[in-house]
Amino acid sequence: MTSILTYTFKNLPSTSKWALRFSVRPLSCSSQLRATPAAQTKSKKTLAKPNIRNVVVVDGVRTPFLLSGTSYKDLMPHDVARAALLGLLHRTSVPKEVVDYIIFGTVIQEVKTSNVAREAALGAGFSDKTPAHTVTMACISANQAMTTGKDTVTKDNGIRPSSLEQMAKLKPAFIKPYGTVTAANSSFLTDGASAMLIMAEEKALAMGYKPKAYLRDFVYVSQDPKDQLLLGPTYATPKVLEKAGLTLNDVDAFEFHEAFSGQILANFKAMDSDWFAQNYMGRKTKVGLPPLEKFNTWGGSLSLGHPFGATGCRLVMAAANRLRKEGGQYGLVAACAAGGQGHAMIVEAYPK
């Protein structure tokens, strides 16, 4: 059986050899929320598929997300990632020797560390025989790390061909007189790391873990980066719903990455437009709007910050924890990324 650790973070410029003294925290789950009894999950159909191994989320942690260039500015990227990794090991007590593979997501490469996953793993005390690799896909690098890990658990123990070659080619440009993005309505530059333990369901149960959620269907999309740069959620949401056989009404928790407030509003407008669906998406009818009472109810990237390579894990764990607390069954995670890319994933609550 295979188990995978996925870790994600934003690279930090650094030359210091300071020891790490900050703590890690559960992803999107305060001590008050953890003390609240979990609500009963609604009874709906499961997304389990015949002869397909279930992959579960055991748990996840993150370092505090801090303003870039502050408390972490003198730390190496793999130091911050190692802190999240050590925190996850402490929280789950997973033996290092049962971890078969380690995957990190990163965005801004730091020249001294070409494979941060490997450096962080060795720094955390993993065997030098535990393979590790690093992926990059702009703001959905964390998502790519998770889904690469999911495919590795589901299919076999090797790295599979995927869309890792899709790289961000264009940077966002905000041109007057139409520009409305300011520092006040943008996700602020943030340093931080996150880590998540995922493995085959049978392996998790055999080791005595109570999983939090299943990782189900996912998609990656790309569109014209010139005028649809950050509309990834609009394109990815209907595709992942169709792949899973669900509708918007079936989803109990929506977690969308908030790059900018205007980006969320633009996606909402596109999702609620028959004209956009017919002229740009090849659909007869609009996608539809997520109910606001189910949307980012525990805060999003605008309020919590956005370490480019760490947000994906935060989104998934926020959805998983919300489903447990609120008694929902399905969560939908979606994110945009530079270069006109996007991602969406269905998370299913683990039964009580």
Image: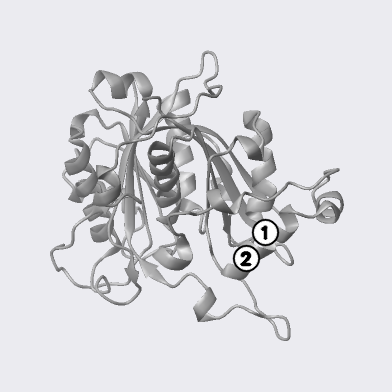
Is 206 located above or below residue 63 in the figure?
A: above
Q: Which amino acid does label 2 sit on?
A: Gln
Residue 65 in the image: state x and y as whole percent. 33, 64
The crowding category of the residue bearing disc 2, from other C-alpha atoms within 10 Å (few below 14, some 14 to 19, many at least 20), is many
Residue farthest top in this picture: 51
Q: Out of 150 and 93, give the one closest to the viewer.
A: 93
CA separation in Å, label 1 and label 2: 6 Å
Residue 157 on image: x %, y %: 40, 27
- Going 32% across and 72% down the picture, which residue do you hit? 13
Q: Mark 2 points at which residue?
A: 263
Which residue is at 24% across, 35% downward? 129
Asked which quadrant contains residue 210, the reply is: top left
Query: As shown in the figure, which amino acid type bears the numbered disc 1?
Result: Asn
Between 83 and 314, the residue placed more toward the observer is: 314
Seen at 49% across and 28% down, the residue is 42
Residue 223 vertical placement versus 150 (above, below): below
Q: Is residue 340 above or below residue 152?
A: below
Q: In the rendered image, which quarter contains the N terminus?
A: top left
Q: Kindly check if marks 1 and 2 are in contact, taking CB atoms under 8 A apart as contact.
A: yes
Q: In which quarter of the image is the C terminus?
A: top left
Q: Which of 53 and 29 is in front in this view?
A: 29
Residue 139 place in picture, x, y as percent: 51, 58
- In the image, residue 207 lies at what x, y percent? 23, 22
Q: Is mark 1 on a helix, strand or loop?
A: helix
| Mark 1 Cα shell of 10 Å, populated few (<14), some (14-19), many (≥20) | many
The residue to which callout 1 is attached is 267
| Quadrant of res 203 | top left
Please tell me whether mark 2 sits on a helix, a strand or a loop. Answer: helix
Can residue 280 be seen in the rendering of this structure? yes
Tell me if I can see residue 305 in this picture.
Answer: no
Which residue shows up at 78% across the image and 48% down it? 286
